[in-house]
């Protein structure tokens, strides 16, 4: 079976670094949940989005399994574990998922061992 990797951009930052050319920004944390809801909707509806856009998926794509998820940014570690878990659940519901690796870009000043344990208990670490 072919394997897929999924990249999820979380475009939120605490500050905008002068050297950064990525599409990111500093926003109110009140925008985090609506963004995650939109990402989950896009994950679950990707087939229809591709169909409407005229994009044909390659043969065998539907049978491929997701083994890698990468949360990049911005600073995805700004999100609460429940929001990250929601995106992981959307991936599990939509694709055959057997995660070997889940990577999360993090600000080491905000990411503590306690938050890592919480994420692990919530299914962010397999």
Image: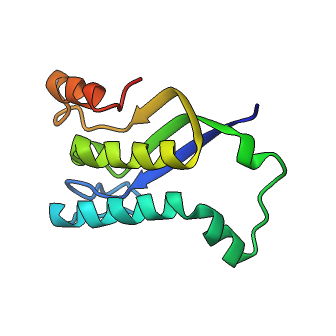
In the image shown, does 96 or 49 lie closer to the viewer?
A: 96
Rendered location of residue 81, percent (x, y): 24, 41
List x then y, in percent, for residue 87: 39, 49
Q: Quadrant of residue 16?
A: bottom left
Q: Residue furthest bottom?
A: 52
- Residue in the foreground of this view, choosing between 122 and 11: 122
**Residue 5 shows in this picture:** yes
Residue 83 in the image: above or below residue 52: above
Please state, as top left, top right, bottom left or bottom right, where the C terminus lies in the image.
top left
User: Is residue 28 visible from the viewing direction of this image?
Assistant: no
Residue 10 on image: x %, y %? 37, 54
Q: Residue 88: x percent and y percent?
A: 41, 43
The quarter of the picture where the N terminus appears is: top right
Horizontal arrangement in the rendering, residue 61 relative to residue 32 (left or right): right
Give the residue at x 61% y 71%. Answer: 49
Give whichever of 36, 24 is nearer the camera.
Answer: 36
Residue pictured at 43% horizontal, 54% vertical: 9
Residue located 29% across and 64% down the image = 25
Which residue shows up at 17% across the image and 37% down it? 110
Number of disc labels = 0
- Residue placed farthest to the front in the image? 93
Residue, far right: 59
Residue 69 vertical position relative to residue 83 in the rendered view, above or below: above
The colour scheme is: rainbow
């Amino acid at each position: 079976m072919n394997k897929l990797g999924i990249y999820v951009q979380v475009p939120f930052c605490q500050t905008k670094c002068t050297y950064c050319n990525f599409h990111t920004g500093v926003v109110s944390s009140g925008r985090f949940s609506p963004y995650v809801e939109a990402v989950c909707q896009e994950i679950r509806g990707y087939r229809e989005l591709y169909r409407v856009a005229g994009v044909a998926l390659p043969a065998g794509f539907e049978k491929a399994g997701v083994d890698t998820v990468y949360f990049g940014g911005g600073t995805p570690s700004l999100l609460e574990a429940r929001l990250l878990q929601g995106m992981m659940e959307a991936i599990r519901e939509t694709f055959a998922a057997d995660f070997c690796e889940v990577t999360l870009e993090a600000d080491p000043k905000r990411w503590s061992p306690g938050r890592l344990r919480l994420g692990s208990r919530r299914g962010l670490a397999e």
